[in-house]
Amino acid sequence: MSPRGVAIPDLRERLFDAAERVLARDGAAALTSRAITTEADCAKGVLHTHFAGLDEFVAELVLDRFTRSAALAATLPDRAGDDSVAGNLVELSATILSLDPGVVGLAVTRPAAARRVREAWAEGAPGFDVIQASIEAYLDAEQHLGRVGPGMDTGSVALAVVGTLHHLLMTSRPGGPPPQDRVERLVHALTSPA
């Protein structure tokens, strides 16, 4: 355990990682401040020293994980012309689907956290809308290069991919069938020439 009064490097990420491990192992009902700090090998009160409470912590965890996904999606337009169109979209989808379903589910099951996440997204924090815009920009770039047909409605394809990712994240359960196969089939269906 970290000594009292000594700064813990990367504390925020350490707590987030610990929360994900608790969720994966024990489920959402077991997610308490004490369970998180015990898993992170930190003093009991450290979470409440850095966050207003468990709901704020959960909201920040969800926002952090979406920020990471959005940052990855933002690099997609720069990959236009590399690898295959479907392959690039499948790779991004796999990364987004690697978010722990328990973490995503927390955004729904804890009303105060859900409200904070929605407020942050309304204020411009990265979420599904940013990911969708990145996919559309990527498909536009691929269309310009002639790697997708000129008749593709890139905005609708981006919406379909993001809507599917959202659905699968919200309905996937730990231990359930991996959703990646379904996304891969969808991406190939949407990007294949007619």
Image (cartoon, rainbow, N blue to C red):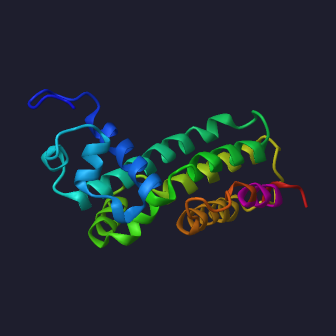
Judge whether 189 appears above or below 88 on screen: below
Q: Main secondary structure of the magenta part?
A: helix
Q: Was residue 162 drawn as part of the magenta stretch in this picture? A: no
Residue found at the far right of this picture: 194
Q: Nearer the viewer, residue 85 or 174?
A: 174
> Seen in the image, is 27 located left or right of residue 182?
left
Q: Nearer the viewer, residue 15 or 42?
A: 42
- Residue 20: percent from the left, percent from the top? 41, 49
Residue found at the far left of this picture: 5
Tell me, yes or no, if residue 122 can be seen here: no
Q: Nearer the viewer, residue 40 or 106?
A: 40
Judge whether 34 appears above or below 7 on screen: below
Query: In the rendered view of the protein, which quadrant contains the C terminus?
Result: bottom right
Q: Which residues are magenta?
A: 182-189
Residue drawn at the location 81% of the way across and 50% of the way down: 148
- Residue 45: percent from the left, percent from the top? 14, 47
Judge whether 144 appears above or below 187 on screen: above
Figure quadrant of residue 13: top left
Residue drawn at the location 49% of the way across and 41% of the way down: 71
- Residue 118: percent from the left, percent from the top? 35, 66
Residue drawn at the location 21% of the way across and 29% of the way down: 8
Query: In the rendered view of the protein, which quadrant contains the N terminus?
Result: top left
- Residue 76: percent from the left, percent from the top? 62, 41
Judge whether 31 appears above or below 38 on screen: below
Tally the marks: 0
> Seen in the image, is 118 located left or right of residue 170?
left
Tell me, yes or no, if residue 158 can be seen here: yes
Residue drawn at the location 60% of the way across and 59% of the way down: 175
